[in-house]
Amino acid sequence: MKKNASLLVSLLLLAVAAHAAEVTTTNRWIVKGTNGANQAIPISMKGFTGEVDAVLRFDLGAQGFEFVADDAAYFLVTGKNDGNVEGHVRFTATKQELLGKAYAGGSPRTQAHALADDIVLAVTGKKGIGLTKIAFKRETGHGADGVMAEIIVADFDGHNGIAVTSDNVNTVAPAWVPGHRVLYYTSYKLGNPDIFRQDLTSGARSVIARHSGLNTSAALSPDGAKVAMVLSKSGAPNIWIANADGTGLRQLTTTPDGDSSPCWSPDGRTICFSSRARGASTLFTVPAAGGTPKWLQTVGARNATEPDWSPDGTQIAFTRQAGAFEICVVPAGGGEAKVLTAGEDPSWAPNSRTVIFARRANGKRTLSLLDVPTQRVKDLPRILGSSSQPAWAK
Amino acid sequence: MKLVQTLRLVALVAAFAVLSTGCKHDPKNITPIKNKAAIPPKGDGPSDLIPPSRGIGGDGVPTGIPTTGIETTNLKEFDGMIPDPSFFASETVYFDFDRSLVKSGDKKKVENVATYLKSHREEKVLVEGHCDERGTEEYNRTLGEKRAQAVREALAKLGVSSDRIRTKSFGEDKPAVNGHDEAAWSKNRRGEFVLLRPKAGT
């Protein structure tokens, strides 16, 4: 048995080596091309129809797969969706079946997302994002106090959206409590930008920060126990930390010219944020327990704002703000930054490879997905209206 | 690490090898999908529509949203005052791109506001800070606050007690002028004064 399996692995690697210049075996099917950029995984698919077909193509396309003709595909996906969804994955070179599954219950969309996740797992060894959720700000109109927006929670592909606020004021900057159906966001409902906490299961909510001046940009620690945020109660907008309920407040930074957009390292020890400490906006890190902020260099991408730390801890995505906005990534320790695509406010998916972000055109904001290794972009449906500030549930 | 991954890979492939034997087109492996109802109620209706929220705002949440034991620094002193946004409309000050310095050309406007406030001690002022659309949203929310604070400091230097001045940043979300050029942007990078009158009977 083990011998057979080893033989199969060798065959798989051989087949990939024949297609590409370099193969990394640690990430099973992340194939490195000759130009050093990660290439998409060639796949062919047949047998599915309508919505199920569309969901599969969207999900796989957003996670580094590329649909090609059978003879160019490394993997063949077949299946059907007359009634329940059923799918198979075969490795082209050996015809060996890697996956054979059928699904019961739920909606056709959910079954399709589940199959997409199983395909991603079978081929890459990593968990897919087909069943994950996002939250974002969606404009609903303009009132006497400017933009009115509500917080929407939807499937990661923008479908099944539900407004979780209906305050008819500006509601912005949603942030998830990791592992929980709980959101923090900034609301102008009480006449001031204040930070609210809302349990999406019960609908119960409370105000966790309503100090004089600005209260915004909540970011929850990986264990959900602490909240980092931007407050201006003692002067310039700086980074503060409190317990999840807003008690136990302490000031983490004191930059006279202001700080913005805190995020947490996945081990909960470090906060990364954007600061004006060096003049133009740059990224800094500071121990969550307190300490001296350290400049995090983003060589090749000045004016760095809106950092978001990848769940695997290796990279930080951010927005370069220089006339236009661009999504960039930099190693978590700082260094050479890569400018990936036009857009702003990146938020990592749990898979540490897909990023959701916002774009602006004609006064409207739209959401898109970026597969970081292949730099491919997929747009979320335009039915979402003017939407921005996405946050991926982790 | 690499060894673990290799072992995992072998195990995975082995599992599929077993799985696939004799069941290529008849998967016994049926995965039940549970509707987790993570965000209730989900519904399978037209997925393109965003339904209104439930259990929030209109139905269920009392007007006074509980605050969880936090101090609400002096915001209460401004609650219930009656805002008059038009009173100081001609005193709006404007900022350079990405800056929060009150320009010398605008000092006279700040003086006008200070003079009024010093002779009307029962009244207060809200300073609104605004930005053009060329920053990211949360960055602009901090920039708008810095602008409002710069105006507050200018008022304080002229003798207006800073506890009579409240700041509020709208970031780029309340533009004075719609448009995507410098003509619009220069009018949107601004600080506005909203006179706060005491509520009737006080």
Image (spheres, coloured by chain):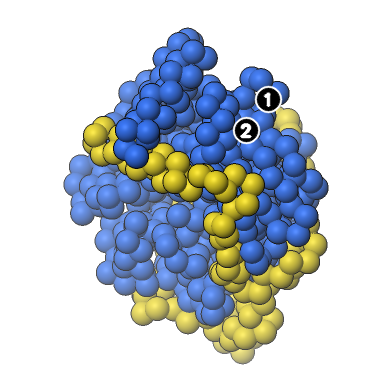
Mark-to-mark CA distance, 2 and 1: 7 Å
Nearest to the observer: residue B92 or residue A70 = A70
Is A180 rendered above or below residue A310?
below
Closer to the chain start, of discs 2 and 1, is: 1
Residue receiving disc 1 = A70
From the image, state the color of chain B: yellow
User: SS class of the residue under badge 2?
Assistant: strand
| Coordinates of residue A368 in the picture (x, y in percent) | 64, 40
> Along the horizontal axis of the image, is B10 left or right of A15?
left
Residue drawn 41% across and 39% down? B13
| Coordinates of residue B60 in the picture (x, y in percent) | 62, 86
Is A133 rendered above or below residue A13?
below
Quarter of the picture containing the C terminus of chain A is: bottom left
Q: Quadrant of residue A312?
A: top left
| Coordinates of residue A77 in the picture (x, y in percent) | 64, 37
User: SS class of the residue under badge 1?
Assistant: helix
Nearest to the observer: residue B48 or residue A173 = B48
Q: Amino acid at mark 1?
A: Asp
> Along the horizontal axis of the image, is A224 left or right of A114?
left
Q: Amino acid at mark 2?
A: Leu
Residue receiving disc 2 = A76
From the image, state the color of chain A: blue
Say whether marks 2 and 1 touch (CB < 8 Å): yes
